[in-house]
Amino acid sequence: MNDTASLNLAKQLIAQASVTPDDKNCQQILAERLKNIGFAIEEMHFGNTKNIWARRGGSAPVLCFAGHTDVVPAGPAELWHSPPFEPTEREGRLFGRGAADMKTSIACFVTACERFVAANPDHAGSIALLITSDEEGDAFDGTTKVVDALKARGERIDYCIVGEPTAVNVLGDTIKNGRRGSLSGNLTVKGKQGHIAYPHLAVNPVHTFAPALAELAATEWDAGNEYFPPTGFQISNINGGTGATNVIPGTLNVKFNFRFSTESTEEGLKQRVHAVLDKHGVDYSLEWACSGQPFLTEAGKLTDTARRAIAEVCGVEAGLSTSGGTSDGRFIKAVAAELIELGPSNATIHQINENVLLEDIPKLSAVYERMMADLLHSESA
């Protein structure tokens, strides 16, 4: 499959050292390409974050491609086999920071649109791109703010394809049709500091918390469902003590996280944790932070369209999954009737020597194009 346009655009984007939230020139490059095929470009910049909402057409259905131009830091440059921001072809792969997560997907969005529009200048419905530069960072001024603006003016998305890397073994083997929610707790257990030889004069917060921890770790929060695994509770950090071996600590800090399914709610999980702590008489303060609610697109038109396109282009039967961390899909789902994530391999994301298979690049662009043809009722192949 010959598609040098997708490869060349991916290289052009990788060459921009767009470490979050600095977009460098990525969105400008994309905007110029999209303007040339009739997209209206709307800049929605908030704080230090650049966002664009590009749209071609004014009618339904609206098919949106969503992604981020920002990348995580490259790490020690000397550990890379080639400079991280110099896209390099080697061993049948394209290397560079952002190659998998997710500049190749964005390049494939654009080239798929270029081919589709050339073949279907009067296509039905609308094509849109939502691109942010703050997905890998705090995500305060990125997609969430764009979604708020779209919601405020009544714009809706019928189908959204987020280009996050989803393939596990081969391109197209996995479609993410949802993600678990993420709820974190920062717990401070209060005790009374004292000499370890006189425990009756102190209160050891490690000891008072231990029974509650055992119960929290053993609790079944829910059983999951056909799309989601059971909700999981994990401790990420426990810290207490003065550093001395003869001092009972006065406080204990515990950080934990829930990755929760649609069978649980944020408020329900909070209430159950407080109930366990209160049951065991723990003296504590607890701060909560929810970075994303769970979302789900049940198997239907969008997942069927993606599976069909993958089968035609890649010869692969795609499975549905809700595994992994959070993505900007958690924000977009508020205005999108159906949403999936579909992109290249996730095997090297955020790693030294991040890469994608060269042969996967034209295939990914072709999958996106075929989905456009199907969802926008085109006769184009």
Image: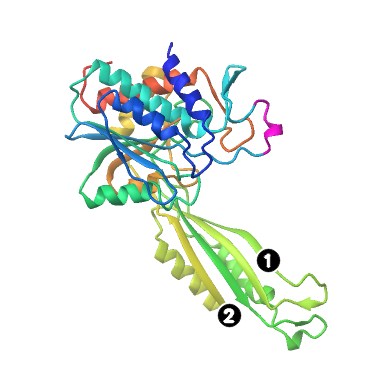
Q: Residue 10 location, x and y as percent?
A: 47, 25
Looking at the image, the residue that sits furthest to the bottom is 201
Task: Give how far across and how far down residue 171 sits, in percent.
Answer: 47, 25
Residue 58 placement: quadrant: top left
Q: Quadrant of residue 202?
A: bottom right
Query: Residue 22: x and y, percent?
Result: 49, 42
Q: Which residues are magenta?
A: 76-82
The question of residue 374 being in magenta is answered with no
Q: Find disc 2 in the rendering and name its residue.
A: 283
Q: Nearer the viewer, mark 2 or mark 1?
A: 1
Name the residue: 58% across, 30% down.
85
Q: Going by the picture, which residue comes out furthest to the top? A: 2
**Location of mark 1 (residue):** 239
Q: Residues within 10 Å of mark 1 (few under 14, many from 20)?
A: few
In this picture the colour scheme is: rainbow
- Image quadrant in which the N terminus is located: top left
> If the image is split into quadrants, where does the C terminus sit?
top left
Whether residue 335 is situated above or below residue 312 in the rendered picture: below
Q: Amino acid at mark 1?
A: Asn
Q: Mark 1: which secondary structure? A: strand
* Number of dots carrying numbers: 2
Q: Secondary structure at mark 2?
A: loop
Q: Residue at x 67, y 30 (%)?
A: 80
Using the rendered image of the protein, determine whether residue 360 is visible from the camera's viewpoint: yes
Q: Is residue 80 magenta?
A: yes
Is residue 346 positioned above or below 112 on the image?
below
* Amino acid type at mark 2: Asp
